[in-house]
Image (cartoon, grey):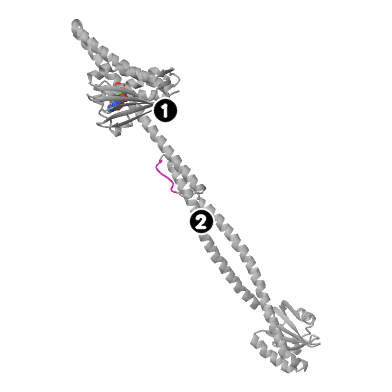
Amino acid sequence: MTKRIIWKFFGAFVFLTLIAVFVLNFFVSLKLRDHFEQKITRELRSNATLVGDILKDDLTEARNQDIQDKVNTLANKLDLRITVISEQGAVLADSEKAPASMENHAERLEVARALKNGFGQSTRFSDTLNYNMKYVAVRIDDVNDILGVVRFALPLSEVQLQIQVIHRVVLFGAITTLIIALTIAYFVSKTITSPIRQMQQTAQRIAKGDFSGRVRIKSKDELGQLAKALNAMADELQQKIENLKRMDTIRTDFVANVSHELKTPLTLIKGYIETLEDRAIDNKEKTQKFVSIIKDHANRLENIINDLLSLSELELSKDSLAKTTFDLKALIDEVALGFGHALDTKNQTLTVSAQGNDFKVTADADKIEQVFVNLIDNAIKYTKHPGRIDISIRQDAQDLTVIVQDNGIGIAPEHLNRVFERFYRVDKARSRQLGGTGLGLGIAKHIVLAHNGKISIQSEPGKGTKVLVTLSRK
Ligand SMILES: Nc1ncnc2c1ncn2[C@@H]1O[C@H](COP(=O)(O)OP(=O)(O)OP(=O)(O)O)[C@@H](O)[C@H]1O
Ligand SMILES: [Mg+2]
């Protein structure tokens, strides 16, 4: 199992959240504890002041027994220890021990402070009670006299118990926050990492040669753009691979076709020569007939080989073009003239029309002638008589466009984009019977492309075919 990026994100989130929660918790606890202690002290102080008020008269008149009784009752009600101390430090009353048995309290920190400032507090171990205590002492005044000190004592454990409750509440809050934060962190990590994961899986499929996968991410951020780029790359690769595959089949087809096309006339030639050897050699008439057939097939072989040569020559370099400047319309008129006989035998008419007055182009005239020979040858071959072939020339600022249009048998759409391939014939038997090898349009296309021109074909079965050739004037 590979390490997943989500856990890196999530780990970082967890770490940050933990730090944040603990730091916050620490300060909140500290502050709350402070606040709470102050509150307890304030309460004790005001209660002690109140007790002092209650004891004022008794103190003035030194009614020690009354003081002791009241101290007992009040300590009981307030649930803490109360001690009353004279200005000299003598214990006058105490809610838990006999005052007579207690030593002088003037030196006790909270008492000394209360006598001096009116209020004092301290926290210390009580020898009398044997545990940590919090002491709060308040001075009792009567106009100019000091009547004594009222001291409250509270076990520290009780204070701490209350503070612990606060701690627990804060801790509970922290844990709740932590859980909520982590849940959010998990989902945020997931939203960030899921597109990454999707892309990783798609890329892996592409690496294995499956180009069909696409990433579905619509966000406009960097991830969205990355996904878009990945999809574009997959599109491009898929197209390239398909092209390569197509080229490969074209190549194998080509080799098979060449062999076949060359083999057929050769087999025939061989057959005629053998027959000639066996029997016909003495018959002059027969010999002449055979030789003429052999010559026809040899011519056909030569034509095919010439076509193939000119194709590979065109593919090898564009530099082999012998460019001159000539009048394209004049060239087409001349080519058309050469087809006079063929047109007459098939009872077809051919017209050449032109728009404009300047048909000069700079190109390889022999090659361009070959293009139109092939196109007109096709138009005649694949049109039943009586047919019409119209050639029109249009002139633009930059280019000349020639349209060769016939009203012949046409080409079905499924064949249309393949007719430029070498040896591709829609109807093999028929085409061969008409003397075609399937190289004409392939040659035409290569010549036009070598001139940086454009060639396209439009056709409708039964209606006719239109081939458009665009050549740049320069
Ligand atoms: N004008 C047209 N009308 C109908 N079909 C056509 C036309 N031109 C070409 N085709 C079809 O396209 C195929 C390829 O044409 P192409 O000129 O390359 O070969 P070909 O005419 O069969 O042989 P070649 O031109 O080498 O003698 C033809 O076999 C034919 O089926
Ligand atoms: Mg042809």
State how far apart marks 2 and 1 are (Cα).
61 Å
Mark 2: secondary structure: helix
Q: Residues within 10 Å of mark 2 (few under 14, many from 20)?
A: some
**Could you say which is closer to the camera, residue 280 or residue 335?**
335
**Could you say which is closer to the camera, residue 158 or residue 381?**
381
Q: Is residue 156 magenta?
A: no
Residue at left 62%, top 63%? 23
Residue at left 41%, top 28%? 396
Range covered by the magenta-colored residues: 210-216
Quarter placement of the C terminus:
top left
Q: Residues within 10 Å of mark 1 (few under 14, many from 20)?
A: few
Numbered label tally: 2
97 lies above or below 290: below
474 lies above or below 223: above
Q: Which residue is mark 1?
A: 396
Residue at disc 2, CB closer than 8 Å to ligand 1: no
